[in-house]
Amino acid sequence: MTGQSERAHVLVEGQGDALAVGNLLVRLSADCNASLTWSTPVRWPNLHLERGLRKGAEFVRAKPDVRALLVLRDEDDACPKRRGPEMADWLRSLGLPFPSAVVLLHPEYEVVFLPCLDYMAGKLLDGRPGLDAGTVWDGASWEARRGVKEWLSRHFPRNRSYKPTLDQLPMTRMVDFDRLRHAGVPCFGTLERAVTFLDRSRNVGDVYPP
């Protein structure tokens, strides 16, 4: 039986991801009726490389309170449909004594903001000016364009740009999950399935995607 003190651990890449990802996962778990308790995400280098992922997973393995592991990173180069299963195989080869999952946000974390821009536009971000009023996504699809951070900056007031370390968390707080589901953002669907998988799996070594 799972101990109440056990936590789901998270490895992330980006500067500023830890607080934003923590907020996203806690809220999403509640929305999915998942009973996971999340530790504060840890920024880990070279998660795109097998050696980096292995070192990160071994770092988590050594902890006494592990219920599950989630590796969450941006992927703006390789195809997530191929890259995700490849990284999952790296984890599978380690024989971890807990379930684990890999989620690649394509092309980057900020894609989860895009269906919610009309709600975010014109609002302050922790007291700072945020997106210009009337801002909406103009891409052909949610994942069609690289450089979402730069695109967001072009829609901030003059002399103000999007900064993940300052803006990622307050914008994450405004993310609406029903909007993301309705919009069909592929990597959000992957994240939601991964959270459900980690919550339900009780088999040692289970890895998502299968």
Image (cartoon, rainbow, N blue to C red):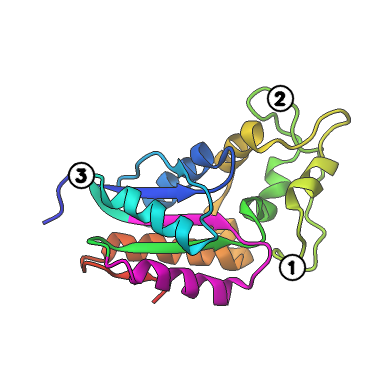
* The residue stretch that appears in magenta: 69-95
Residue pointed to by mark 3: 64
Q: Residues within 10 Å of mark 2 (few under 14, many from 20)?
A: few
In the rendered structure, the answer to whether residue 97 lies left or right of residue 152 reads: left
Instruction: Estimate the spatial distance between the alpha carbons at disc 1 and disc 2, rounded to whole Å.
Output: 29 Å
Residue pointed to by mark 2: 128
In the rendered structure, the answer to whether residue 146 lies left or right of residue 177 reads: right
Instruction: Estimate the spatial distance between the alpha carbons at disc 2 and disc 3, rounded to whole Å.
Output: 40 Å
- Local SS, label 2: loop
Type of the residue with mark 1: Ser
Specify the farthest residue to the front. Answer: 51
Q: Quadrant of the N terminus?
A: bottom left
Instruction: Estimate the spatial distance between the alpha carbons at disc 1 and disc 3, rounded to whole Å.
Output: 42 Å
Q: Are marks 2 and 3 in contact (CB under 8 Å)?
A: no
Q: Quadrant of the C terminus?
A: bottom left
Specify the farthest residue to the right. Answer: 158
- Local SS, label 3: loop
**Residue 161 percent location from the top left of the image:** 79, 35
Q: Which mark is residue 141?
A: 1
Of the image marks 2 and 3, the number of the one nearer the N terminus: 3
Seen at 75% across and 66% down, the residue is 144
In the image, is residue 60 above or below residue 194? Answer: above
Q: How many marks?
A: 3
Q: In which image quadrant can residue 79 be found? A: bottom right
Q: In which image quadrant can residue 140 be found? A: bottom right
Type of the residue with mark 2: Arg
